[in-house]
Image (cartoon, rainbow, N blue to C red):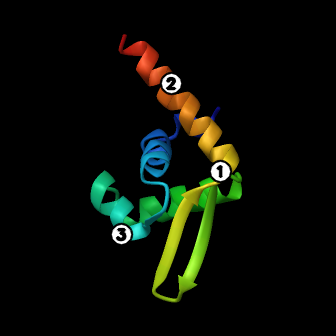
Amino acid sequence: MEVLGKKWIVPLLIFLLLYEKTTFTKIKKHLGLTSRALSKKLKLLEALGLLEKIVENPRRTIYLLSDRGKEISQMLLGFATNISK
């Protein structure tokens, strides 16, 4: 829960849930994070087992949520939906 309170974590999880497979550049462009901040957040989520990183080749890396990451992201999206009602 402490991690979810960190800046950019919730928007990042929701973005990854909605886009399923995405690249660093696409995330950076849509969320407006700096490269350094995004890199730190992705490493944190990967270390916690919420994110999977697939290196297709040295120039292309794909990010997607793990099963655990999907569960948490869906719960967050559910909370947001219930709050807005």
Residue under the point 42% across and 68% down: 24
With respect to residue 76, does 29 lie above or below?
Answer: below
The residue positioned farthest toward the bottom in the image shown? 58
Kindly identify which residue carries mark 1.
Answer: 50
Image quarter (top left, top right, bottom left or bottom right) of the C terminus: top left
55 sits to left or right of 18: right
Check whether the beta carbons of the residues at disc 3 and disc 2 lie within 8 A of each other.
no
With respect to residue 24, does 84 lie above or below?
Answer: above
**Amino acid type, mark 1:** Leu
Residue under the point 36% across and 15% down: 84
Q: Nearer the viewer, residue 48 or 34?
A: 48
| Residue 34: % across, % down | 34, 62
Distance from Cα at disc 3 to Cα at disc 2? 27 Å
Dot 2 or dot 1: first in sequence order is 1
Q: Secondary structure at mark 1?
A: loop
Residue under the point 68% across and 48% down: 67
**Which callout, 3 or 2, points to the residue nearer the camera?**
2
Characterize the local packing of mark 1: few (<14), some (14-19) or many (20 or more) Cα atoms within 10 angstroms. Answer: many
| Residue 49: % across, % down | 71, 53
The residue positioned farthest toward the top in the image shown? 85
Distance from Cα at disc 2 to Cα at disc 1? 18 Å
Kindly identify which residue carries mark 2.
Answer: 78
Dot 3 or dot 1: first in sequence order is 3
With respect to residue 84, does 33 lie above or below?
Answer: below
| Residue 68: % across, % down | 69, 44
Dot 3 or dot 2: first in sequence order is 3
**Amino acid type, mark 2:** Gly
**Amino acid type, mark 3:** Thr
Q: Secondary structure at mark 2?
A: helix
Kindly identify which residue carries mark 3.
Answer: 25
